Amino acid sequence: MGPVAGGDRVRAQYEAYPYPQRDPADEARRLITGSPSDPDEISHYVFGSQLDTTRRFRALVAGDGTVILSQMLAWRDSPAEVVYWDLSEVALEIAQARAEAR
């Protein structure tokens, strides 16, 4: 079995069972924040406390976490750009709907 076959199985799993399974309508009353999408934690653990969220930077987020990180950076008026990537089209649609709801 090559990497493509394994990737297809993973994609199929997340298409059938997107993670996290959230209803975008819940975003208005359930604004979840925190680890591992907290900019301060990312700065500390990934960048040795050197990430300056007041300056423009780009973050690539593979899988869930994009919506929360984007919201937390928006609250700080950060000029950051967050790019989302996921194997699952279903998960991508959920993340887009959640972002639009926020």
Image (tube, grey):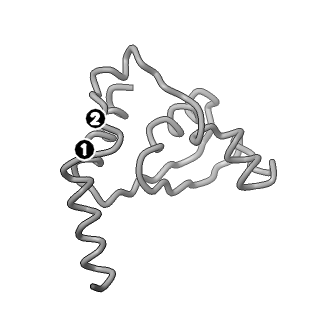
Residue 4's quadrant in the figure?
bottom left
Residue 68, x across and y down, in percent? 49, 35
* Residue at image coords 39%, 57%: 85
Q: Which mark is residue 93?
A: 1
Q: Considering the numbered disc 2 on the image, is that residue within a helix, a strand or a loop?
A: helix
Residue 66, x across and y down, in percent? 46, 44
| Left-right relation of 57 to 30 | right
Vertical position of residue 53 compared to residue 45: above or below = above
Residue 82, x across and y down, in percent? 50, 49
Q: Residues within 10 Å of mark 2 (few under 14, many from 20)?
A: some
Q: Which mark is residue 40?
A: none
- In the image, 42 versus 54, the foreground residue is 42
* Residue at image coords 20%, 60%: 12
C-beta proximity under 8 Å, tags 1 and 2: yes
State which quarter of the image contains the N terminus.
bottom left
Q: Which three-letter amino acid code belongs to the residue tagged 2?
A: Ala
| Left-right relation of 28 to 53 | left
Q: Considering the numbered disc 1 on the image, is that residue within a helix, a strand or a loop?
A: helix
State which quarter of the image contains the C terminus.
top left
| Left-right relation of 93 to 63 | left
Q: Which residue is mark 2?
A: 97
Question: Distance between the Cα atoms at labels 1 and 2?
Answer: 6 Å
Residue 78, x across and y down, in percent? 62, 38
| Left-right relation of 102 to 17 | right
Q: Which three-letter amino acid code belongs to the residue tagged 1?
A: Glu
Q: Residues within 10 Å of mark 1 (few under 14, many from 20)?
A: few
